[in-house]
Amino acid sequence: MNERTQPVSGPEFFRVIRSESMTFPDAARGTPQLQLSDLWGLSRDRLTKVVPAVKPNIQICVSDRHVRARIRGVEEDPILFELDTANTFAFNRFNGKACIGEISADLAAIMSWEEDQGYASTRSLFLRLVRLGVCEPHNAI
């Protein structure tokens, strides 16, 4: 069985290598690890334990009521989110110190939202930023 694979670009290659190198030590010790692509399927209980962090070397800027990222190798700065209280509060907590559960509970409290709405907003922003290559879990999942 000879499996053919598609070549990957330089940045994608290094993302895969980095992901594998981050999970290999724990996997070698018998601790199951997930890939970033598995984040979308995590239960609420597991996702609330994730500690989000902005990747190193990502520059954040504000332009036309939007928060954007300057990513090396990307020509146009992608829009991360609209500049508003909820998104800004959650994003500022994506610093590798608080888990999604804490961030979403605090967001719900300051916005006078139900807990589910705080979680949904935080989850949505985090997964969007992961997809854009701006955020990643700071802890093992």
Image (cartoon, rainbow, N blue to C red):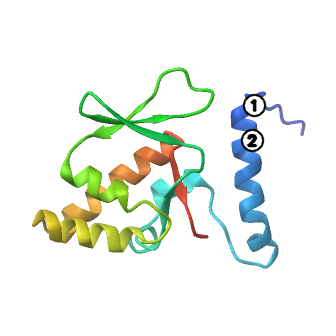
The disc at residue 14 is 2
Provide the secondary structure element on which disc 1 rests. Answer: helix
Q: Quadrant of the C terminus?
A: bottom right
Q: Residue 140 appears at what percent x and percent y?
A: 61, 70
Q: Amino acid at mark 2?
A: Phe
Q: Amino acid at mark 1?
A: Gly
Q: Local crowd at mark 2 within 10 Å, few (<14), some, or many (≥20)?
A: few
With 47 as the anchor, is 101 left or right in this view? left
The residues tagged by marks 2 and 1 sit, at their Cα atoms, a distance apart of: 6 Å
Q: Is residue 33 above or below residue 18?
A: below
Q: Residue 78 appears at what percent x and percent y?
A: 43, 30
Q: Is residue 15 above or below residue 113?
A: above
Q: Residue 109 appears at what percent x and percent y?
A: 16, 71
- Residue beneath disc 1: 10
Which residue occupies the foreground of this view, 42 or 79? 79
Q: Residue 99 appears at what percent x and percent y?
A: 42, 71
The disc at residue 81 is none
Which residue: 43% across, 50% down?
127
Q: Is residue 65 above or below residue 107?
A: above
Which residue: 20% across, 46% down?
84
Furthest residue toward left: 112
Provide the secondary structure element on which disc 2 rests. Answer: helix
**Which quarter of the figure has residue 93?**
bottom left
